[in-house]
Image (tube, helix red, strand yellow):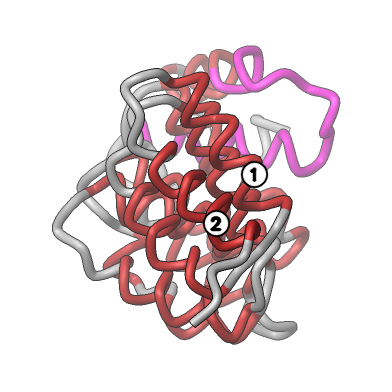
Amino acid sequence: MTITRQDTEGAGALRGLEDASSSVRLRAALAVGTTPDPGFVGKLVERCAIEPEFFVRDMLTWALTRHPVALTLPELVRELRSERAQARSQALHTLSKIGDRQAWPAITRTLLTDADDEVARSAWRAAVVLAPEGEEPALAAALATQLGRGERETQLSLSRALVALGEAIEPALRTATTAPDPGVRAHALATLRLLRDPDTGFGYAIEEAKRVVALGGSEREGR
């Protein structure tokens, strides 16, 4: 069998993905994406699960988007069942970047409610991108079960995902404004405010919503 220069360079790039230097790993991921090869896919997915640097992970995702969906999709969907949170989160992120709706059935309620905030946030973003037309109300209802969850960054991610679904979210949010938990009610009110006025900052919207809830106000008063 003849070993070509491209084979040698590809092997070198794959080894570079494991280098101790993040800059070397970044260049290796760039090289792998620049010259896609079916043999790279497994290694790229494997590295996504353990790569500690954000910028390198982002380049690994880009490299995966350069490969055929028929090769990447099965590998990424398999990662969604991984016990490693980063593997699940990065696979979801990559699926959202690929944007192929064949992946939609893999975005389960289990992922949307994952105990790890990063996984859940990635699942919310992926779900919004991958949901087929007509699935918006059901997805909105599922996402609304996470209202009030986590710190402000997590809540902002959820609000952005919900707002991206458009007016389909209103029934689920109106229901949530009557929830027993004041944190859920405030988050629902803030998200409704963002839907109606996208230029409103989330910080202002959530603080105003908390004030309305504390005063015993209603969804109408939070407008």
Between circles 1 and 2, the one closer to the viewer is 1
Type of amino acid at the residue the image marks with label 1: Ala
Q: Is residue 26 magenta?
A: no
Residue at 55% of width from left, 27% of height from top?
Answer: 55
Residue 50 position (above or below residue 139) = above
Is 84 situated left or right of 159 in this image?
left
Question: At numbered mark 1, what does the secondary structure look like: helix, strand or loop?
Answer: helix
Q: Is residue 173 visible?
A: no
Write down the quadrant of residue 132 in the picture: bottom right
Is 38 situated left or right of 176 in this image?
right
Depth check, front residue: 85 or 158: 85
Type of amino acid at the residue the image marks with label 2: Thr
Which residue lies under the disc numbered 1?
31
Report the magenta residues as a range: 182-206
Determine which of the numbered discs, if any, sits on residue 94 in the image: 2
Horizontal and vertical percent position of residue 54? 47, 27
Q: Is residue 204 visible?
A: yes
Residue at 70% of width from left, 67% of height from top?
Answer: 168
Q: Residues within 10 Å of mark 2 (few under 14, many from 20)?
A: many
Horizontal and vertical percent position of residue 6? 64, 59
Write down the quadrant of residue 71 in the picture: bottom right
Residue at 46% of width from left, 54% of height from top?
Answer: 11
Write down the quadrant of residue 26 in the picture: top right
Is 44 situated left or right of 33 in this image?
left
Q: How many marks?
A: 2
Depth check, front residue: 149 or 218: 149
Horizontal and vertical percent position of residue 119? 35, 48
Name the N-terminal-most of marks 1 and 2: 1
